[in-house]
Image (tube, grey):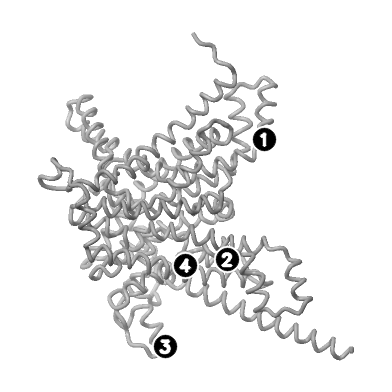
């Protein structure tokens, strides 16, 4: 009897070890697959003789990174990306904050249809919108440029304003379209977070004589801060990585953001500066990776809306 | 002046708060989605005469569409791409990682971080990284790797274009499957496993009789989300292959773009977009109904 028990417990440890080894093997293989493409970009960014191929660097240099700041276009792409994606994220947070709050608190008839509507809007594949959105942007573009021409007759001023406010080849258009694309997910996240804040808190604050604004400022915003963090991170990551919108709505070099600038530089097959591009790729990727590291813990919470961060 | 009660003032306030977000989504997503239907019935073009004066052509774009081998090719490529990368590639590798991470392994956060890394990379950089991986000639990373197994250097993006983009998208999406499936695994009560062990069930039996059935809702959710998002992919494939060579990687998004902005046929592009919209809306409505999403 004793012998039987011992042998079966040995069996258990043997299978335990075997499946443990299998687990490690699986994880190591999948991790290698995931890491492989990164070796090249990280090594080449510091390699004085960077090429398209993975190679052991002959030395270590920071010249490629310095080049980005010296090279006008590289720096401009970075700044354009920061300005456009940054503004779009802030705008998304403001609108999603209000929208999510309203959707969480209201009991009006439009609550349910709107929530389902937002799920469906989230499912619309952006490439399917390129033709009609282009038309809409074209229309808005004509309208705003008409306004600008009425506003000032000075050609230089017109050009400057047009760069800022145009819908095609202008900052405003890109900011608004990025914002619109990120709103459904952001509203959904904010609504979920506001749902978790009891209404009593607001009512208690109101009873204590707090004004509407004070309630928002000192009660709601602090409590919803994790929601804003989650919504902001996802909006930032998605807009930062988006390729389609810049591709459709920018043409002038002054307005190019990182994805498009890099893509076009990469197309000039005869003169690709791999050191410059890999260094830029590292700079372009880092903010997204950092944001993703923070956003990761929110990822499972956003699934209920049928949406992927 | 009409005096509003506290409650009706609040209700009015909610509408005002909702307005800016609704306006933006309506202008840039909802209206364009419907506008695509009406554009698809015209011969509007990006350049030339039809750009100014487009006319109603009825269902001509659609009859052309259904007779167009390139459209069917694009639909087929999209289907293979979605099944190959989202339904099989990401799911299998993500499930394997999730199962392995359930076990008491060391360095869990490190494995986790490495597997998540590809998901955080912008689409353009993904294309950039993999063009180097797929580089032809004996110095290409993948070619050097397969040389260990005695395989000759390949021109990956030319010889196996569709397989290549499936590998890239699988690589990118393992993390998402892993995270979602991990949360599903964590929700399975541990005592079910213990009861099965006491009854003498083997690992394989436990996996097929307990894990898989208990995971079905999560798997369904994963399949839905990943199908919809993979269906909407554009930048990743565009930066890698732009749909080529010879339309072999021309997924629907790329086909729409190429028809509209390379061939300048906006009306025809809109007709393709309508097909893609209808497919995703059907998926979406099935999802909302099946899961009875809590709102």
Which is more foreground, mark 3 or mark 4? 4
Quadrant assignment, res A175: top left
**Chain ID at mark 1:** A
Q: Residue under label 3, please give it.
A: B148
Q: Residue furthest right?
A: A1
Q: Using the numbered discs, state the Cα–Cα distance from disc 3 to disc 4 in whole angstroms.
A: 30 Å
Query: Mark 3 and mark 4, same subunit?
Result: yes
- Give the number of the mark in front: 1 or 3: 1
Residue B110 percent location from the top left of the image: 58, 67
Q: Nearer the viewer, residue B167 or B134?
A: B167
Q: Which residue is mark 4?
A: B87
Which residue matches tag 1?
A: A198
How packed is label 4: few (under 14 Cα within 10 Å), some, or many (20 or more)? many
- Residue B44 locus on image (x, y percent): 18, 46
Q: Is residue B220 above or below residue B245?
A: above
**Answer yes or no: do the residues labelled 2 and 1 have beta carbons within 8 Å?**
no
The span from disc 2 to disc 4 (Cα, nearest Å) is 21 Å
Between marks 2 and 4 in the image, the one whose residue lies nearer the viewer: 4
Say if A93 sits above or below B201 in the image.
above
Q: Secondary structure at mark 4?
A: helix
Identify the residue at image location x=36%, y=73%. Answer: B164
Q: Position of residue A269 (x, y in %)?
A: 23, 67
Q: Residue furthest top?
A: B1
- Residues at marks 2 and 1, CA–CA distance in whole angstroms: 35 Å
Q: Which residue is found at the position 22% from the left and 31% from the top?
A: A157
């Amino acid at each position: 009897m004793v012998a039987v028990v011992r042998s079966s417990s040995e069996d258990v440890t043997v299978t335990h070890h075997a499946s443990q080894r299998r687990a490690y093997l699986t994880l190591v293989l999948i991790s290698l697959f995931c890491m492989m493409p990164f070796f090249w970009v990280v090594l080449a960014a510091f390699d004085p003789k960077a090429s398209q191929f993975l190679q052991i660097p002959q030395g270590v240099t920071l010249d490629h990174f310095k080049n980005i700041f010296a090279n006008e276009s590289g720096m401009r792409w970075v700044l354009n990306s920061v300005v456009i994606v940054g503004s779009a994220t802030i705008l998304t947070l403001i609108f999603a904050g209000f929208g999510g709050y309203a959707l969480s608190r209201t009991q009006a008839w439009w609550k349910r249809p709107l929530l389902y509507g937002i799920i469906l809007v989230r499912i619309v594949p952006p490439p399917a919108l390129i033709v009609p959105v282009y038309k809409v942007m074209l229309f808005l573009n004509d309208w705003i440029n008409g306004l600008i021409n009425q506003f000032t007759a000075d050609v230089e001023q017109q050009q400057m304003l047009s760069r800022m406010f145009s819908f095609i080849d202008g900052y405003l258009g890109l900011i608004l379209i990025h914002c619109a694309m990120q709103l459904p997910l952001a509203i959904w996240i904010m609504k979920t977070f506001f749902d978790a804040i009891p209404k009593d808190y607001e009512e208690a604050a109101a009873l204590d004589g707090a004004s509407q604004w004070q309630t928002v400022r000192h009660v709601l915003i602090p409590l919803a801060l994790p929601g804003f963090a989650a919504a902001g991170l996802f909006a930032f990551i998605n807009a930062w990585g988006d390729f389609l919108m810049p591709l459709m709505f920018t043409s002038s070099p002054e307005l190019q953001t990182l994805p498009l600038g890099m893509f076009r530089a990469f197309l000039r097959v005869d003169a690709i500066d791999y050191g410059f591009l890999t260094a830029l790729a590292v700079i372009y990727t880092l903010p997204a990776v950092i944001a993703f590291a923070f956003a990761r813990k929110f990822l499972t919470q956003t699934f209920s809306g049928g949406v992927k961060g | 002046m009409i005096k509003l009660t506290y409650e009706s003032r609040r209700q009015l306030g909610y509408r005002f708060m909702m307005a800016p977000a609704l306006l933006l989504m309506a202008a840039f997503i909802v209206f364009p989605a419907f506008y695509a239907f009406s554009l698809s019935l015209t011969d509007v073009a990006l350049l030339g005469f039809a750009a100014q004066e487009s006319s109603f052509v009825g269902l001509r774009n659609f009859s052309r569409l259904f007779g167009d081998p390139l459209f069917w090719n694009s639909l087929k490529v999209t289907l293979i791409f979605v099944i190959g990368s989202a339904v099989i590639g990401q799911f299998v590798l993500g499930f394997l990682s999730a199962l392995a991470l359930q076990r008491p392994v060391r360095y869990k956060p490190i494995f986790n971080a490495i597997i998540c890394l590809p998901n955080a990379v912008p689409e353009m950089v993904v294309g950039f990284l993999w063009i180097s991986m797929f580089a032809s000639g004996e110095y290409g990373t993948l070619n050097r790797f397969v040389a260990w197994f005695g395989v000759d250097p390949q021109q990956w993006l030319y010889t196996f274009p569709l397989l290549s983009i499936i590998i890239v998208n699988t690589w990118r999406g393992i993390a998402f499957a892993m995270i979602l499936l991990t949360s599903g695994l964590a929700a399975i009560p541990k005592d079910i496993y213990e009861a099965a062990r006491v009854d003498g069930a083997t690992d394989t039996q436990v996996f097929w009789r307990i894990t898989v059935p208990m995971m079905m809702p999560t798997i369904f959710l994963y399949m839905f989300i990943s199908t919809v998002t993979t269906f909407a992919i554009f930048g990743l494939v565009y930066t890698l292959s732009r749909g080529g060579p010879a339309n072999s990687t021309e997924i629907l998004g790329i086909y729409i773009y190429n028809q509209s902005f390379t061939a300048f046929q906006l009306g025809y592009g809109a007709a393709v977009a309508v097909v893609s919209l209808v497919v995703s809306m059907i998926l979406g409505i099935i999802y909302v109904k099946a899961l009875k999403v809590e709102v």
